[in-house]
Structures are given as structure tokens and as C-alpha cells.
Amino acid sequence: MAKSKKTTFGLAAAGAVAAIVGYLLPWGVENVAEAAGGKVPGPTATAPDRYLYYPGTEALDPDEMRVTACGTGMPAARRGQAATCFLVELGNGEKFLFDIGTGSMANIAAYMIPYDYLDKVFISHLHTDHFGDLAGLWAGGWTAGRTGPLRVWGPSGATPEMGTKSAIEGFFKHYQWDFKTREAVLSPVPGQIEVHEFDYMGNNAIVYQENGVTIRSQPAIHIADGPVSFVLEWNGYKFVFGGDNVPNKWFAEHAKNADLVIHECFPTPEILVKYYGQAPTVALRVGTRIHTSPPAFGKIMSTIKPRHAVAYHFFNEEGTRYEMYDAVRQTYDGPLSMATDNMVWNIRRDEIVERMAVITEDAWSVATLEPPPARTTPPVNMYSKEILDGAWDIRDSEQQLLQEHADRYGIDLKTFK
């Protein structure tokens, strides 16, 4: 495996396919032999696994942590980069989502992890690019096999209506039709959301502690009161997720001695003007006072000295990455990833390995447990007489399908409506 080095953003830029080609084409026999530990591979040998990660094919070691970038971009999510979301998987089987920004559910689904294992979401703050795809996880997981409620942890606000609890209450008002119609057919249990709101002013306060995992929060400074950062500790490992956060004393104190630190590194003001359509004064304020600029990101990392730093919250492309990278390197020369979606870090005692995941766009959900019982009676009461009168009787065309399914699963069609 390739160990973490100072510069690791090239692979993210090239993509998974280019990584394979870039590895194979320039290498002569001597280089291949060196990479293979002195043994020249035969014509049917496999390429080294240092570049690519195939979800669902690689068991996580009991003494290992894996972090996957499911969203690394901007509020205007696009096909190539969703908004903020990071998946943390631990060797004891626990999995956690930190933020679930707009567009990130497509990446989450591509990893084909049973939804029963994706039931814990920690929200840093209530901007849509950090929790806008909660609806997709909620409804998608409900219809695709989750057996229990979704569990959400998030900060309070300066006033009750600005906190996570109020946001979820509003969520159910907004999705009332969705909730009621699914509840009428499916088990209502997975349609629930358990809200764990905690004080956004808690300094290194424990907000979660189960199965050997402790998660703490600290205040973050971002546009208004309410945002937080998170620190996850397990088995001697320390993972830090900054959310949206300008430099502050809490982060500088509690992010020290971490294995992997993910912190925003917002586009420079010039990039915001040139590519994002913002006015120069707005770009300056947003890029340096509401978000963390690349040199400020570097200063933070030089101060806390993580084993590996991850910069995110920018569109990682040819027009931006070099300016961003050079600006970070003005103030930081340690191990660094310039993040993009589907980048993966395996955190081990002696190394941190960065790779790109190879994902499918045609993933199906994977069921694990027997689902809770569905409703035993059809939701006829959900229809008005006028709508029912508009139904077209085509039962003769599907009789064979119905009978075959009923025979296979022991369903009595006489009671089926």
C-alpha cells in the first residue's frame, strides 16, 4: 500500500480510470518488479491495489477505520461533486454519517451498504448543503429495507426554532403527504426520526457514547450561532470533522493529535468571482470571514499537526485545484488530500492510505434484517370516492403475475385488495 505523502491530489483529479492507465502505461519491467516487492508479476497477475477501492469487496480490519467522501463540493451540487457528506466506518461494525448535503445520497447508495447500518447522522449545521439530502436517506432507507427509525444528532440554535429539533419537526410538516402515504402501506417504524439535539455551545461535550465510540462537539464559527464541529474517538483513533468553520480556539485545542482531520477549505475570493458568479465584495466576505480560505486552512493544519489533513468544500477541477493547492502550501507542508467525491482513506496504526472508490450508478439496496410487519389492510381510506371511481379494472391482465407471486410467498389472494 502507498503510504500518505504530502501531495495526493493528483489521483482525485485524474479519476479512477485514468489512475489505472497512468499506472500501467509508463512503467517498465523493472519498475513493476519494484512495485511488486521485487517479484515480476505474470501476465495474469492483478494490478496493485494502492489506487482503487471496490465497495463491498474489502472487509474492514477490526483495528481499522475507513472514511469515505460522499460529498465534498458546494451548495450548488453538481453531478461530479455533491454537497458535504462523509461516511465513517469502524472495525467494530459501527457506521456514522457526518452531514448529508444536497446530492450526497446518490453516492451513499452507490456503496450498497444496508440501510440498517446507515441510521446515525451527525449534522454540523442546518444549511441545505449539509443536511439537504436527509429526506433521501429517510424515505429511501424506509422503502429499501431499514427496519428501525433514523437517528439524527444536531445542535441547538440561539433560539428554539433555530435548532435541529425544530428543523425535524418542520421536516415532517413539509413531508406530511409523503409520510402519511408511505405509513399507510409500509411499517411506520422506519419512517420515524429520533432527534438528539445538544447544546451548540458545549465545549468538547459528549453527544454520543456507545459501543466504545465517543463523539464530542465543539462550537464552530460560521455565519451565525449554531454550527458545531465533531471529534470521534474509537480504539485509540481520533477523527475530526470541522463542518463549516473559520479558525477558532476550540478547534485548535480539540483537533490536536488526530489521525484524520477534515476541514473546509473554501475557494479563494478570485475563484468565487471568476467561476461562482459572486460579487467581489461578497466573495471576499464569504471566502475569508464566513468560510476558511486555503492559507487559513494551512495555518490550522500547521498548528494542530494531524497525521493526515483533508481539505474539502470546493469544486475540485482543473480551473481551481492548483490555485487552491498552492495557497494551502503557503502555510502547510504536511500530509494532505484535496478532496473530491468518492475518495477513501483507510486509517491504520502505521499508515493512512488514500484511494478512489470505483462505484456503480446502478446500485440496488441491500437488505439485512426481516422488515417490520407492513399494514395488514389496504389504504382505501386514503382515497376519495371521486378518485376511486376513476380506477380502470385491468385485473385480468395481471392475474398470472398475481397468482405466481401469491403461490411463491403463501399470500391468500382472496384477502388481497
Image: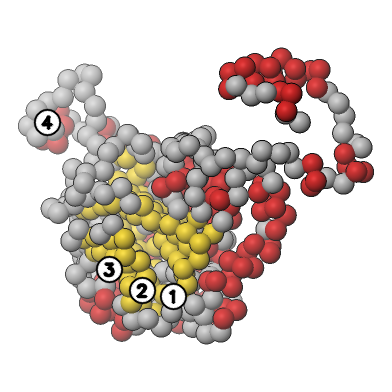
Residue at 60% of width from left, 45% of height from top? 187
Q: Nearer the viewer, mark 3 or mark 1?
A: 1
Residue 307, percent from left and from top: 20, 63
In the structure shown, which secondary structural element does the residue marked by tag 3 occupy? Answer: helix
Residue 384 to residue 255: above or below: above
* Residue hosting label 2: 217
* Residue hosting label 1: 198
User: Is residue 138 in view from this perspective?
Assistant: yes
Residue at 57% of width from left, 81% of height from top? 160
Q: Nearer the viewer, residue 322 or 203?
A: 203
* Residue hosting label 4: 33
Disc 2/disc 1 C-alpha distance (Å)? 9 Å
Disc 4/disc 1 C-alpha distance (Å)? 55 Å
Q: Nearer the viewer, residue 126 or 305?
A: 126
Disc 3/disc 2 C-alpha distance (Å)? 28 Å
Query: If you read the primary sequence from the N terminus, does the residue marked by circle 4 or circle 1 appear first?
Result: 4
Disc 4/disc 3 C-alpha distance (Å)? 34 Å
* Residue hosting label 3: 329
Q: Nearer the viewer, residue 414 or 230?
A: 414
Q: In which quadrant is the N terminus drawn?
A: top left
Residue 161, percent from left and from top: 60, 79
Q: Nearer the viewer, mark 4 or mark 1?
A: 1
Dot 2, crowdedness within 10 Å: few (<14), some or many (≥20)?
many
User: Is residue 345 in view from this perspective?
Assistant: no
Image quadrant in which you'd find residue 35: top left
Q: Are marks 2 and 1 in contact (CB under 8 Å)?
A: yes
Q: Are marks 3 and 1 in contact (CB under 8 Å)?
A: no
Given the image, on which type of amino acid does mark 3 rest? Arg
